[in-house]
């Protein structure tokens, strides 16, 4: 009988003392088996030397050469630049952080080996802060064989600690001493190899495998592990769902009279899709366990009213309902709408945001705690400790892609305290980010799904044009005509690449100034996240009331803002944004009677990918098509924004790459949960752990 790797502690390895062992334990790596599931992030090919003449932009390469010259250069930022030559070309090595000792090492005639990413700096190719090795002479150094795995690391645990520990664990790995958790019949059905083979190859890729094959993930050995992780994650989400359903919640019947009265007070009829989703939510509210539902609806599909009607059910029974929005502007806007809708019902609506003045906040907090206020609209401020809810029974989260799982959990815990743990509130999350169905089923398997797949009648699609920034003057002229001749209101959106709010605001301020000077006949206003709350509110009100013609804004207006009369939008540097974000922004127009337009004013030259993305925006207004394209062009991590969205972050699997596996994943997960609960449990323990603090770059 062999000792299982799962029973051998990591501390038995050479180089793993008590301190390292403790750090590993904190990452849930206790045994050699756990260690082998610490899978590589990517691989490095250090098995050859690349001639400088063959280098390509963006490639990761290894170069050997002789130092020709080195100098400190005073540009925007001081840097040490060293030119090396290998007889085929010159490569610039650039260091922004360097010591004088380093400068002295860069002497002409010294041979040097460097490994890093190739960038284009000036006229030569270059590398910024590559890994450097000083060589004795011009002889090619001894190179590593095969591909080298790069592991995710964390503070205090170095790459080489993992490399060495994993190498030792691999030397003990046999087919018979790792725990196979996928039943044999599933391995056979899918023609998957044994676990040990897959682990061995991922850590030490054989010489004959190409890096491309590994990275594309098509190899069955990789599929084998991806399958296992997907099954584990699916089981874990199903368990969350079952657990939620085991809790109590208040069951609500619809108040038919009030519902009818509310609908009659609206100047329009709800769409069929809105009605359908409202009744799906209503039947959840009738149950005695908490609803966990995700509502998807494209921008402008009328999600707010869907929420309002369901909140009406709850508050009519004298319970509290809250609506949480990701920005102050949006919270204010919702507050206005709700005040308006609920006024005739004598239902008190309260706003709570962190930037409210102290006395206003105090009153709001009192009303919330006493239960005088039944509908509460707010931002993250609703999480704060001073907030005490009173009989909270429904939590609606708007634009949920802006909130993390953790924030949702905090709110849930709070609401539980409010009810002395007796019952849980129903939860509704709404998103305008249309996520393709395959992804939702997997990444949000703990939620039920409703889709508002119809826009209110009379909406005209937004016509989108793409123009280069050299036509800025013409664009400004067009803005002027649109306003003076067509009486349109206009958004001018400033974006920046690194989402630094500070810089974005500065850019918006500069543009605001410029447009005031260029368009003296228009009333031009500015809004950005750094402005005082009252001022922001004032600016938004004026724009809504038609007192301003042109609103210069940062992407703060991306989510939810609703001004039907605005019918032209200029977006600067659209190439810097993701498709879904552009779609959100553009959704701010096309809400009224007028035919709407959007001008995407890019800064050339555009990459191939950027060209394609802007083309998609020009060709379609359909959020689902855009989401599919976004996936294709950027990958699921970006689209789901894994960290932020509350969707799960896979360690290894990739739901697009592995989407062919999904039907079997569901079957296998259900099979295990029903027939082999122990295996199901063990799979979750193996794969579903928090590795948040691991660096994944
Ligand atoms: P989103 O789904 O993007 O959050 P909103 O809830 O902000 O959309 O609604 C967008 C606009 O459409 C609002 O002005 C709202 O009053 C209006 N609206 C909602 N439902 C309908 C409807 N059935 N018919 C006409 N207009 C509607
Ligand atoms: Mg909305």
Image (tube, grey):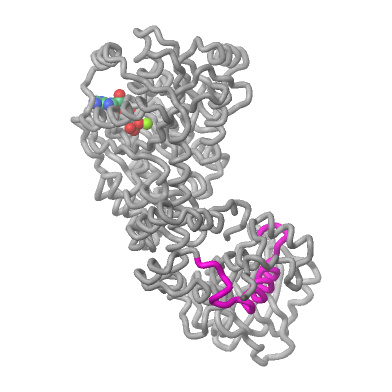
Q: Is residue 157 magenta?
A: yes
The x, y position of residue 473, in whole percent, is 36, 43
Q: How many marks?
A: 0
Q: Is residue 133 above or below residue 266?
A: below
Name the residue nearer the viewer: 173 or 479: 173
Name the residue nearer the viewer: 623 or 436: 436
Check the picture and name the quadrant holding the N terminus: bottom right
Task: Dividing the image into four quarters, tell me where ligand 1 lies.
Answer: top left
Decide if residue 633 is in sight here.
Answer: no
Q: Is residue 20 above or below residue 324?
A: below
Magenta residues, as a range?
A: 154-180
| Residue most extreme to the bottom | 139
Q: Residue at x 44, y 58 (%)?
A: 230
Name the residue nearer the viewer: 491 or 160: 160
The x, y position of residue 112, in whole percent, is 68, 82
Check the picture and name the quadrant holding the C terminus: bottom right
Q: Is residue 460 above or below residue 104?
A: above
Decide if residue 541 is in sight here.
Answer: yes
The x, y position of residue 201, in whole percent, is 52, 77
| Residue most extreme to the front | 1
Q: Quadrant of residue 345?
A: top left
The x, y position of residue 598, in whole percent, is 30, 41
Q: Residue at x 64, y 68 (%)?
A: 32
Answer with left or right where residue 356 lies relative to residue 547.
right
């Amino acid at each position: 009988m062999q000792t299982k790797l799962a029973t051998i502690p990591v501390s038995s390895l050479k180089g793993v003392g008590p301190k390292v062992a403790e750090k590993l334990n904190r990452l849930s790596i206790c045994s050699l088996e756990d260690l082998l599931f610490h899978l590589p992030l990517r691989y490095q090919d250090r098995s050859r030397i690349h001639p400088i003449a063959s280098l390509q932009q963006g490639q990761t390469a290894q170069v050997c050469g002789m130092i020709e010259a080195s100098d400190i250069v005073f540009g925007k930022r001081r840097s040490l630049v060293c030119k090396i030559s290998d007889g085929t070309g010159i490569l610039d090595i650039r260091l922004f952080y360097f010591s004088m000792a380093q400068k002295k090492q860069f002497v002409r005639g010294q041979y040097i080996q460097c490994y890093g990413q190739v960038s284009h700096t000036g006229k030569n190719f270059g590398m910024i802060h590559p890994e450097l090795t000083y060589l004795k002479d011009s002889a090619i150094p001894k190179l590593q064989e095969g591909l080298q795995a790069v592991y995710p690391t964390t503070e205090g645990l170095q790459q080489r600690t993992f490399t060495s520990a994993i190498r030792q664990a691999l030397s003990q790995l046999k087919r018979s001493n790792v725990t196979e958790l996928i039943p044999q019949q599933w391995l056979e059905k899918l023609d998957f190899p044994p676990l040990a083979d897959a682990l061995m190859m991922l850590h030490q890729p054989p010489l004959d495998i190409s890096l491309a094959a590994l990275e594309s993930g098509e190899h069955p050995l990789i599929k084998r592990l991806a399958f296992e992780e997907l099954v584990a994650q699916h089981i874990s989400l199903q368990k969350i769902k079952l657990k939620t359903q085991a809790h109590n919640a208040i069951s609500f019947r619809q108040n038919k009279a009030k519902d009818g009265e509310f609908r009659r007070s609206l100047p329009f009829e709800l769409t069929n899709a809105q009605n359908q989703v409202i009744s799906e939510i209503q039947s959840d509210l009738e149950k005695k366990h908490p609803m966990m539902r995700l509502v998807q609806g494209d921008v402008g599909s009328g999600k707010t009213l869907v929420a309002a009607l369901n909140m009406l059910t709850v508050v009519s029974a004298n319970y509290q309902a809250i609506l949480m929005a990701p920005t102050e502007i949006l919270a204010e806007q919702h507050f206005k709408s709700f005040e308006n809708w609920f006024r005739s019902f004598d239902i008190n609506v309260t706003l709570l945001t962190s930037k409210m003045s102290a006395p206003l906040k105090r009153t709001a907090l009192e009303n919330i705690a006493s239960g005088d206020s039944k509908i509460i609209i707010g931002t993250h401020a609703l999480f704060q400790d001073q907030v005490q809810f009173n009989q909270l029974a429904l939590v609606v989260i708007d634009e949920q892609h802006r909130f993390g799982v953790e924030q949702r959990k905090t709110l849930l815990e709070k609401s539980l305290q409010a009810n002395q743990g007796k019952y849980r509130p129903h939860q509704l999350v709404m998103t305008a980010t249309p996520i393709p169905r395959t992804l939702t089923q997997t990444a949000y398997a703990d939620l039920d799904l409703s889709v508002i797949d119809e826009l209110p009648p009379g909406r005209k699609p937004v016509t989108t044009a793409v123009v280069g920034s050299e036509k800025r003057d013409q664009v400004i002229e067009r803005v002027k005509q649109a306003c003076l001749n067509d009486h349109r209101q206009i958004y001018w959106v400033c974006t920046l690449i690194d989402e630094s709010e500070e810089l974005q605001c500065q850019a918006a301020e500069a543009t605001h100034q410029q447009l005031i000077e260029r368009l003296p006949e228009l009333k031009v206003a500015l809004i950005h996240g750094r402005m005082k709350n009252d001022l922001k509110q004032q600016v938004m009100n004026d724009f809504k009331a038609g007192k301003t013609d042109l609103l210069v804004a940062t992407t703060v207006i991306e989510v939810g803002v609703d001004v039907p009369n605005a019918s032209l939008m200029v977006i600067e540097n659209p190439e810097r944004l993701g498709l879904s974000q552009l779609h959100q922004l553009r959704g701010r127009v096309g809400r009224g009677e007028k035919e709407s337009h959007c001008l995407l004013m890019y800064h050339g030259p555009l990459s191939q990918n950027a060209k394609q993305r802007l083309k998609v925006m020009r060709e379609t207004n359909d959020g689902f098509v855009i989401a599919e394209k976004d996936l294709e062009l950027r990958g699921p991590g970006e689209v789901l924004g894994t960290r932020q969205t509350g969707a799960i972050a896979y360690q290894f699997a990739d739901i697009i790459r592995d989407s062919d596996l999904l039907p079997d994943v569901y079957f296998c997960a259900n099979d295990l949960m029903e027939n082999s609960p122990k295996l199901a449990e063990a799979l979750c323990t193996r794969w579903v752990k928090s590795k948040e603090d691991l660096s994944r770059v």
